[in-house]
Image (tube, rainbow, N blue to C red):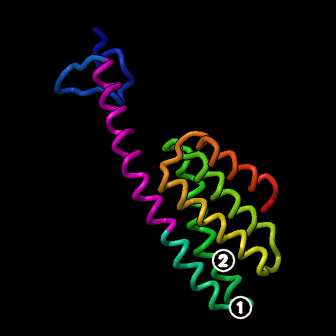
Amino acid sequence: MTTTDDLPDIFKNTATDISLSELEQKALDVIADMSRKYIEWAGNDVAKLKKIFEQIQQLTGSEQDTLIRGDFYRTAHDIKGQGATFDYPLMSDLGAHLCTLIKTTDTFDETHLTVMVQDIEDMSLVLEKRLQGDGGQIGADILKRLKNGQ
């Protein structure tokens, strides 16, 4: 049996020795719990994107630009960073797509706003269908759209 003496200090439990498999199981349980919560967290972020986008549609010029490059970008960036961690790489891909669109666009027009809406809708679909991993055919369709710059 592996004891905590065999583990780096950060994993040692001074009260009791536990087997490595028990420690691994506890870690897997924590990850599973966080994965279940990810749907809620990501759903909240997507709802936030939708709300910000509603505000974006009411603005023009520099006010619209500031909101897109500020709150909207930060929320998309959060989605980009979290998705792959919880086996939702499509969420990361969609977040990255939004971030790249924002970083590479000088002036936002209706075409850009349409792409933003589509990315948000796809994020909602990924979460609704719980499309982990590659997301099957729906995931392939989303990635094809992103690759084609739409």
Q: Which residue is mark 2?
A: 68
> Which residue is most to the left?
15
- Kindly identify the amino acid type of the residue bearing the numbered disc 2: Ile
Q: Quadrant location of the N terminus? A: top left
Q: Considering only vertical position in the picture, is 122 above or below 69?
A: above
Residue in the picture at 35% in, 25% down: 24
Q: Considering only vertical position in the picture, is 141 above or below 134?
A: below
Give the structural element (helix, strand or loop) at label 1. Answer: loop
Magenta stretch bounds: 20-46
Give the structural element (helix, strand or loop) at label 2. Answer: helix
Residue in the picture at 67% in, 75% down: 69
Left or right of 36, for residue 118? right
Residue 67: give x, y in percent of width and height: 63, 81
Left or right of 111, for residue 93? left
Q: Considering only vertical position in the picture, is 121 above or below 143?
A: below
- Kindly identify the amino acid type of the residue bearing the numbered disc 1: Thr
Question: Is 104 one of the magenta-colored residues?
Answer: no
> Which residue is most to the top?
1
Residue in the picture at 32% in, 26% down: 25
Q: Which residue is mark 1?
A: 60
Q: Considering only vertical position in the picture, is 85 above or below 50?
A: above
